Image (cartoon, rainbow, N blue to C red):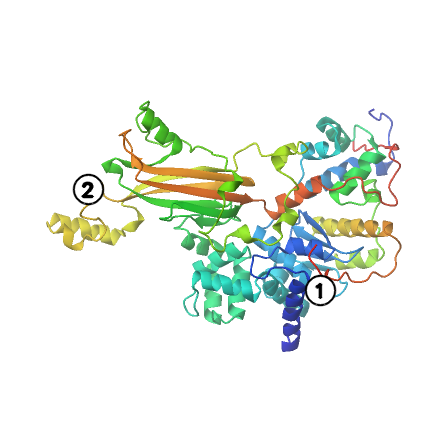
Amino acid sequence: MSPSDNQPNEHRVVGARLRDARLATGLTQAEVAEALGMSRPTLAAVEKGTRKITGLELRRLARLYQRDVAWLLGEEGPDVTDGSALNRATANLSDADKEQVLRFAEFLAAQRRTEGGTAARPRPRPPAEPT
Amino acid sequence: MSASRRADALVAAAETLDALAIDQGAVIDPFAAIDRLGLTLSITKLDNLLGAVVPQGDGGVLITSERSPAIQRYTAAHEIGHWILHEDHLRMDGETEVLGRPSSEMEREAQLFAGYFLMPPPLLNRAIAAYDLRPGGIHSEDVYRLSRDLDVSYEASARRLYAARLIDRTALTQILELGRMSAMQRASAGHRPADGLADVWDATSDEEVVSLVVEEHDEVVMGFDEQRLAGWRWMTAEELARRNSGSARPLQRPLAPAVLPVRPDRYPGERDNPMSRLTVDGRAALEPHGAPESDPGHSDLRRTEPPAAVVEDTFEAGGERETPAQRRRRRTARARGRSSQVDDHVDAAEPQIGGNGVRTFVVRAAVPGEWNLQLYYAHAYDPRDEPLLTYELRLRIQATPTTAFRVRRLQSDLDQRLSGDPDDREEFEVDVA
């Protein structure tokens, strides 16, 4: 299981990003492991980078942490339509705050992509009746 | 800000409440409103930001996990204000934008929106009537109680009362300068909670049953007169049972109280606290689905510890019913042999040897759930003696927004598929070494 060969650089961040995303959400390893039906040592090994992660596990962790899969996999920069504007707008934030805002924007954009296209969205109106 | 823009913000708040069919006479839940607006909520660790509204996708609201529930709720309402009033702008709000005096017109509008949204006139009027608040007679402790019971920040409550012309500019300044912690201590016999973000509730009452709806980490203070030297004590159910069995002398220090699980059917009418958070509208939207106890999925959020516990139990001879000056006068008078004239604190019919003391219990809420404390005022030594008085505290402890959000994440659908997802069986290296 343990990768013995040297991995390309981008692989080095996956475990760390998974860990950071979990801590930002305030969840413990035990909680996340149970939600995914994996053991806690397995999750710990993934976060430490000593165990590979499957596409299924990655997808579920991305949903749980409200993160874009591509970012968890080590892609750099915000993958959002107006990324540079976002970067400018968040320039005055602390690094940690900027990170949270960009990752959340990325997650929201990724959700939208799936639901169909880039058409201008109508502003959601309050429903006429309580849901 | 122009009067018309100011009015627009208030009208928009009123219209949003109407459109979402939110009960404006009850405590408002801005997180449920975020859901109903189709926005995605995230409560996460932030350093300086209190919140943000992010327009990407269908839009989302980001709230810090690092502030009190009241400030989280006020920030959430502020971000809803931006979403409704300010089109598709990314807004990132720190202390000044949400709680301070920002120069930006948009921020002032969002503040007005938030104040109205969480404290619409029906709810505010209900609170004013419940506390019998009158212009000129509103003090910092009243503002604290109002903010606690409406679950909004102390500062927001003060500003809302000012906007409603119930306090003037001078009073507003004094109330804000005194600050929440001092106001809270004034409202709760000087008690300061272990968690400075939590609230304190004074459950001292002559009623036999006091029901409260509180949040995790909140503390409840109760003070009772006790004729200790005459043999009377407030006792827990366990202590009373020990006394009756004759197995033990009363303890110098009381035992931990019996923790009795409360059946839901024992909550027919929570009448003692009219503004209790029980009336939170739509709070269920953030509650875990199903009973946490029956959910095998989440060990750390499973309730293994009791929801609350007695964390302080003290007895003060003389107690707070008598000021030092009064005590001096009484002792002086007694020395001069004319005690009954000036001693208005000890009933002559009561045994003078006992005097009045005050027994104070402090209960701290730990985790969401229901918990009660039963106390009996009885003779500490005589097993045949029936309790003279009984008191029961019934607590319902609600999850903070942060806890509720974590529970909801763990119970969310993790099998939703998005474009760009990898193949389930593909394997990825995660090496960080």
CA separation in Å, label 1 and label 2: 67 Å
Q: Is residue B418 above or below residue B11?
A: above
Q: What's the residue type where badge 1 is placed?
A: Ile
Binning the other alpha carbons within 10 Å of mark 1 as few (below 14), some (14 to 19) or many (20 upward) gives some
Residue B116 sits in which quadrant? bottom right
- Helix, strand, or loop for circle 2? loop
Q: Percent position (x, y) of residue B98? A: 62, 60
x and y percentages locating residue B372 in the rendered image:
46, 39
Q: Which is more toward the observer, B357 or B432?
A: B357
Whether the residues at callouts 1 and 2 have beta carbons within 8 Å, the answer is no
Judging by the rendered image, the residue that carries numbered circle 2 is B351
Q: Residue at x 74, y 49 (%)?
A: A99
| Residue B179 seen | no
What is the quadrant of the C terminus of chain A in the image? bottom right
Counting from the top left corner in percent of width and height, residue B176 is at: 49, 62
Q: Nearer the viewer, mark 1 or mark 2?
A: 2
Q: Report how many numbered discs are placed on residues in the image.
A: 2
Residue A55 occupies which quadrant of the picture? Answer: top right
Chain letter belonging to callout 1: B
Secondary element type, mark 1: helix
Residue B252 visible, this orientation:
yes
**Same-chain check, marks 1 and 2:** yes
Residue most extreme to the left: B337
Chain where mark 2 sits: B
On screen, residue B296 above or below B326: above
Q: Which labelled disc corresponds to residue B345?
A: none
Q: Which mark is residue B84?
A: 1
Name the residue at 22% across, 40% down. Answer: B354
Amino acid marked by disc 2: Pro
Q: Where, quadrant-wise, is the N terminus of chain A in this rendering? A: top right
Position of B376 with respect to A87 (left or right) is left
